[in-house]
Image: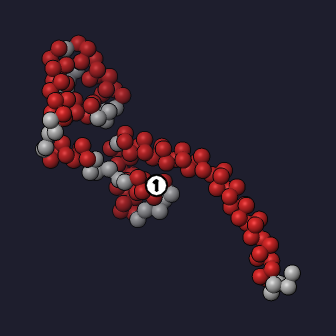
Amino acid sequence: MAEITREQLHAYLDDALSDHETAQVEKALRDSEEMRRRLRVAREERDRGEHSLGAIWRRERLSCPTREQLNGYLHDVLEPGLKGYVQFHLETVACPTCLANLDDLKAKQAEAAPRTKKRRRKILDSSAGILGKVADGGRK
C-alpha cells in the first residue's frame, strides 16, 4: 500500500475519500501507531485553525456550488458555463457534500410533487367560475 499523505488524512477527516481509500486509511490506522499519531496531528491542526490557503479553501468549501446553483442544475436552468462546472464538480470531483445536497433537493422535489399537483388543481377549480364570469362579461 502507498504511503498515506497528510492531504489524504485531511480528506479522511472531511469524509471526502472514496470507499476504497477510506478502507485503506482505516486499515492503516488499525495497524499503525504512527498513523494514529499522524491523524491526531491532523486533528490538532484543524482545532488550532490552520490558515494555509489550501486549508481555508477546503474548510470553507470555496469551490462548491451554492444550494441555489445545485437546484438550478437539478432543474436544468443554469447557463452553460456554470452548468458545466457544476456537472464537473458532481461527476468528476464527486464532492460528497454537494452530492448529498443534490440528493436532498431531489427528495424534497419528489416529496412536493403530489402537493404541488393538488394545489394547482385546487386553484384551477376555484378559478374556473371566476374566469367563466369574466368571459361572459359578468352576466352570470
Colour scheme of the picture = secondary structure
Q: Give the farthest residue toward the right.
A: 140
Closer to the camera, 93 or 114?
114
Under circle 1, the secondary element is helix
Amino acid type indicated by mark 1: Asn
Counting from the top left corner in percent of width and height, residue 45 is at: 15, 33
Residue at 27% across / 30% down in the picture?
A: 12
Q: Is residue 75 above or below residue 46?
A: below
Q: Is residue 6 visible?
A: no
Counting from the top left corner in percent of width and height, residue 78 is at: 43, 62
Quarter of the rendering occupied by the C terminus: bottom right
Location of residue 83 by image quarter? bottom left
Q: Is residue 129 above or below residue 105?
A: below
Residue at 15% across / 47% down in the picture?
A: 53
Counting from the top left corner in percent of width and height, residue 31 is at: 23, 12
Q: Which residue is mark 1?
A: 71
Residue at 40% across / 57% down in the picture?
A: 69
Residue at 41% across / 65% down in the picture?
A: 79
Location of residue 101 by image quarter? top left
Q: Residues within 10 Å of mark 1 (few under 14, many from 20)?
A: some
Closer to the camera, 81 or 101?
101
Counting from the top left corner in percent of width and height, residue 62 is at: 26, 51
